[in-house]
């Protein structure tokens, strides 16, 4: 079955490639035809193009049909009962096949499958494509109503065990009723084999760049969001079977190191022999920053130190390593508590690659001079700054060198960057820049910036302590633990659990709630951090989920059912 499946996948891939090629040619032709009516003209060359366009469209629709038919064949012939199927995916394939068959003239027809509202009388799922298709038909000069289109789609949906019946409702919605037998059979499969991921069409090498705090600065709630969201993305992709690289792109190479090192050399002259006591890096950072802002001589020394560090002077490198170590240990405490695995590969990793990249870009004529800076235009209104007027590199340079390393050297084919939404423009520039210099090819690579909203306090203002300082993440986690313990005691759990069990419950509740509260909000919106809300035992909270799983386990115990008996189910 696997061999058959991979054969179908290959066939589908081939067809997809042909479709892509045809689509590109169509786009070129469309460009040529812009402002010209698609009618026979006196121009023989134009007439040839028009005819070719018609032929290509026809071939494209045939290929589209072939590919959906092929996908369906995979689905129908290759159902591996131990693998889970995504209902939306099965429905999307079935409806896509119906739509392509019924409307061959429409390129890229919209296939919209959505879950119906719970307990609604409109079935379990809905196909909402008819309205958009009616518009597309009108544009092609064909008059028809969404209702007729809905009916035509419904008539062409291949029969499948999953579907009990279809109903076309006004103005053109198709209500989909799932077969109870099919659902019951699938639930039994899950019960017997546990939850398994659906089979993977293509295994990707995905790099997820997340968390990524800055050395010597406090890791703040924004980094906590990135850590939670990024880790969840990694878990999901790993679960699906992709190869995932979890990368911590720490800010360990900025100009701030100049002042930190210069300050360290003066305050602890014997730093090479004895590790200086800089455990409170935050305070150390503040001290050096004050000097940097007030003392011109110090500022000069700080700049000189950056240059020395960036040319890998051994003493400067040693000082830099000491500073990084202090931060690293602090970050690790948070990762350990939240059970986060991540590999550090910070900005410093790209120093030599940045130097090479800049030389290559200059040689190929990509860089332009702009008031002493070297910039790279990417097609938009703002350029990337590749070399500053003082000769230093920037955040743009390190990300451009990083994307090149990731796609070309490491051969990752999917990159995911998880940062606050405020960095969206930066990543847009990086992706466009990488395309322009021939590093990123969207036909083989996928890049995503996963942005998220700001964390707010309960007063809806930026999340800060009462005294206005940034909240230390370790303090935040401690408070979570304290409040979780109070809740557990309120419910009398301390009377029935052993001290170790109580500690475990406390950690699961505290960290589970913090993670779940973040993930259950719309990622794009700002999110109000509220311990009271996240620790509620009703509603959409981790506490509620933890209760639910505990109840299910208790039912299983009463039914004398253990996970070992039916591995993986509970
Ligand atoms: N490749 C990247 N730029 N990753 C994100 C880095 C985030 C950055 N250090 C910050 O704190 O804002």
Image (spheres, rainbow, N blue to C red):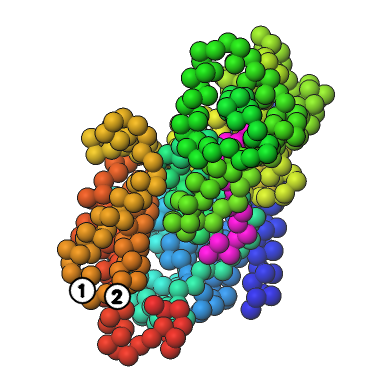
- Where is residue 453, by image quadrant? top left
Q: What residue is pinned by disc 1?
A: 495
Residue 208 vertical placement versus 220 (above, below): below
Residue 265 spot, x, y in % from top left: 63, 27
Residue 143 spot, x, y in % from top left: 41, 43
Residue 138 spot, x, y in % from top left: 43, 39
Mark 2 vs ligand 1: CB under 8 Å?
A: no
**Magenta region includes residue 253:** yes
Mark number, residue 274: none
Q: For the point 26% across and 63% down, which residue is it?
A: 544
Q: Tell me if I can see residue 540 in this picture.
A: no
- Where is residue 88, by image quadrant? bottom left
**Magenta region includes residue 361:** no
As drawn, which residue projects farthest toward the top? Answer: 371
| Secondary structure found at label 1 | helix
Left or right: where 200 falls relative to 176: right
Q: What residue is pinned by disc 2?
A: 498
- Where is residue 515, by image quadrant? bottom left
Residue 546 vertical placement versus 570 (above, below): above
Left or right: where 187 falls relative to 84: left
Q: For the point 31% across and 52% down, which residue is it?
A: 480
Q: Report the Cα–Cα distance between label 1 and label 2.
A: 8 Å
Extent of the magenta region: 238-256
């Amino acid at each position: 079955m696997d061999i058959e499946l991979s054969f179908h996948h290959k066939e589908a891939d081939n067809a997809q490639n042909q479709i892509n090629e045809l689509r590109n040619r169509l786009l070129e032709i469309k460009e040529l035809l812009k402002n010209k009516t698609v009618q026979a003209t006196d121009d023989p060359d134009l007439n040839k193009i028009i005819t070719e366009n018609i032929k290509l469209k026809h071939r494209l629709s045939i290929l589209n049909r072939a590919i959906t038919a092929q996908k369906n064949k995979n689905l129908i012939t290759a159902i591996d009962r131990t693998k889970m199927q995504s209902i939306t995916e099965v429905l999307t394939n079935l409806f896509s096949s119906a739509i392509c068959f019924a409307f061959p003239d429409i390129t890229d027809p919209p296939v919209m499958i959505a879950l119906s509202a719970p307990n609604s009388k409109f079935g379990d799922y809905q196909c909402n494509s008819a309205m958009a298709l009616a518009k597309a038909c009108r544009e092609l000069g064909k008059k028809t109503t969404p209702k007729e289109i809905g009916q035509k789609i419904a008539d062409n949906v291949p029969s499948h065990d999953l579907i009990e019946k279809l109903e076309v409702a006004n103005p053109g919605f198709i209500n989909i009723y799932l077969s109870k037998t099919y659902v019951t059979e699938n639930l039994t499969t899950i019960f017997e084999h546990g939850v398994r991921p659906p089979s993977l069409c293509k295994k990707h090498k995905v790099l997820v760049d997340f968390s990524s705090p800055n050395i010597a600065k406090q890791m703040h709630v924004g980094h906590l969001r990135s850590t939670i969201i990024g880790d969840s993305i990694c878990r999901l992709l790993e679960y699906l079977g992709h190869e995932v690289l979890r990368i911590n792109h720490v800010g360990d190479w900025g100009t701030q190191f100049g002042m930190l090192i210069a300050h360290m050399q003066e305050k602890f002259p014997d730093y090479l022999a004895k590790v200086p006591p800089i455990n409170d890096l935050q305070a150390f950072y503040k001290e050096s920053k004050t000097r940097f802002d007030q003392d011109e001589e110090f500022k000069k020394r700080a700049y000189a130190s950056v240059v020395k560090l960036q040319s890998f002077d051994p003493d400067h490198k040693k000082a830099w390593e000491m500073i990084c170590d202090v931060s690293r240990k602090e970050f690790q405490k948070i990762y350990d508590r939240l059970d986060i695995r991540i590999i550090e590969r910070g900005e410093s990793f790209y120093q030599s690659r940045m130097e090479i990249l800049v030389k290559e870009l200059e040689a190929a004529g990509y860089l332009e001079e702009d008031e002493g800076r070297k910039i790279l235009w990417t097609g938009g209104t703002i350029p990337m700054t590749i070399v500053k007027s003082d000769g230093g590199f920037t955040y743009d340079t390190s990300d451009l060198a990083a994307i090149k390393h990731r796609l070309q050297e490491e051969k990752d084919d999917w990159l995911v960057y998880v940062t606050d939404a405020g960095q969206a423009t930066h990543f847009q520039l990086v992706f466009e820049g990488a395309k322009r210099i021939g590093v990123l090819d969207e036909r083989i690579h996928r890049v995503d910036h996963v942005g998220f909203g700001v964390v707010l306090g309960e007063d809806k203002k930026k999340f800060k302590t009462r005294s206005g300082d940034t909240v230390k993440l370790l303090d935040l986690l401690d408070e979570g633990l304290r409040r979780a313990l109070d809740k557990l005691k309120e419910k009398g759990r301390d009377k029935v659990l052993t001290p170790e069990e109580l500690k475990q419950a406390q950690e699961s509740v505290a960290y589970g709630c913090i993670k779940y509260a973040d993930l259950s909000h719309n990622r794009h919106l700002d999110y109000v951090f509220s311990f009271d809300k996240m620790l509620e035992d009703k509603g959409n909270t981790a506490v509620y989920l933890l209760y639910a799983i505990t109840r299910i386990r208790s039912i299983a115990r009463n039914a004398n059912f253990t996970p070992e008996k039916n591995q993986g189910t509970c």
